[in-house]
Image (cartoon, rainbow, N blue to C red):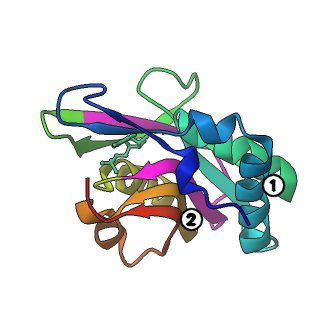
Amino acid sequence: MLDLKPFIREVPDFPQPGIVFKDITPLLTNGPAWQQVIDQLVERYRNKIDIILGIESRGFIFGSALAYALGCGHALVRKPGKLPAATFAASYELEYGTDTLEMHQDAFPPNSRVLLIDDLLATGGTAQAALSLAEKLQAHIIEAAFLIELSFLGGRERLAPHAVFSFIRYDGE
Ligand code: AMP
């Protein structure tokens, strides 16, 4: 098994001063490391989920590969104004201001077993908004999965009682 942390590049002060951006592109461009991530997710969720809910945009990369491997669907949570049909919307607080996510009202059948997926869990605001959209369709949330978890920002606690899975954790900046 490869240690995945060396495949995450830390870029200080991007996109703004004070943020240490976790860049996943070195992992995405390494075939064996990327395959290991998807293979582990396949093993973890095989026969346990009906639909993957991917968050724009890096969540789509994980969601697409995993949905293909599991033979399940991939529903999209997107930034406002991108989805063409009728949507549900959920807003959440940022450090400065608010942001909104949308999902098609018929994204998946009610009572589906749903896995939420994104590249990184920080404060959990994004994932919490996405889960609130899934709950409008009476989703059974199986878990929220992330490649990276910034555990010092408390996202896992914020998403409770939903279960959180992550591959790589950072306990401080
Ligand atoms: P949050 O809502 O605070 O959990 O932030 C999660 C979202 O912001 C994810 O979609 C991430 O891709 C992005 N994000 C937040 N912090 C970082 C970071 N330090 N490096 C890369 N992406 C981040």
Indicate the amino acid at tag 2: Ala
Left or right position of 3 against 158: right
In terms of image quadrants, where is residue 36?
bottom right
- Name the residue beneath numbered marker 2: 139
The amino acid beneath tag 1 is Cys
Q: Helix, strand or loop at disc 1?
A: loop
SS for dot 2 = loop
Q: Which mark is residue 72?
A: 1
Residue visible at 55% across and 50% down? 6
Residue 153 is labelled as none
For the question of whether residue 71 can be seen, the reply is no
State the residue lying farthest toward the bottom.
161
Q: Which residue is rendered at x = 50% and y = 61% of the image?
A: 168
Name the residue: 70% across, 61% down.
2
> Which residues fall within the magenta stretch?
99-121
Is residue 43 covered in magenta? no
